Image: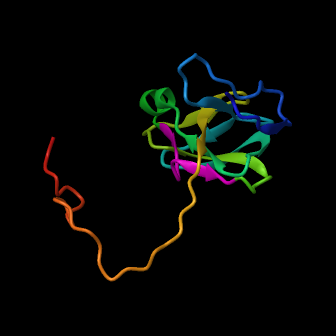
Amino acid sequence: MPIEVKIINRSNNPLPHYATEGAAGMDIRAFLETSIEMQPLQRMLIPTGLFVEIPDGYEAQIRPRSGLAIKHGITCLNTPGTIDSDYRGEIKIILINLSSEKAVIHDGDRIAQMVIQKVEKITWTPAEELSQTSRSEGGFGSTGKI
């Protein structure tokens, strides 16, 4: 059963929605007065005109769109970005142009996707040692190549 999330849309774009039955993410669109150019390696904060009230115990994750990344070299920084349940400001997307060519972002362009996830809270248990595993302290490539 879907959870209800309050949303204010100050843009003239449609609300984020699932494009297919099996989609996990909803496309987020740019809300711009005029198109903007992104130079190679330039970062920008792109407004969406969206404000949400995520229920306690959930977060919204902002992720790149795979087509935008592979076709144009545009991706999100701080990925996945987290929108906490107590944030009420406008959703803005941090984009970067990783291509060698300038890119143009237009009002209404699909620039990212949003996934709503349940968040588990933990409590720390201070300890003097941790259980051993076959991996133990091995990290960063310790499990071998492909």
Q: Is residue 124 left or right of residue 4?
A: left
Type of colouring: rainbow
Q: Is residue 68 left or right of residue 109?
A: left
Identify which residue, 143 or 95, lies in the foreground: 143
Q: Is residue 87 visible?
A: yes
* Residue 31 on image: x %, y %: 76, 36
Considering the image in quadrants, where does the N terminus appear? top right
* Residue 5 on image: x %, y %: 76, 38
* Residue 24 on image: x %, y %: 55, 29
Seen in the picture, residue 42 relative to 122 is either above or below; the reply is above
Identify which residue, 146 or 33, lies in the foreground: 146
Considering the image in quadrants, where does the C terminus appear? top left
Point 68% across, 24% down: residue: 17
Point 81% across, 39% down: residue: 6
Point 20% across, 55% down: residue: 141
Seen in the picture, residue 129 relative to 93 is either above or below; the reply is below
Q: Identify the magenta region.
A: 74-84
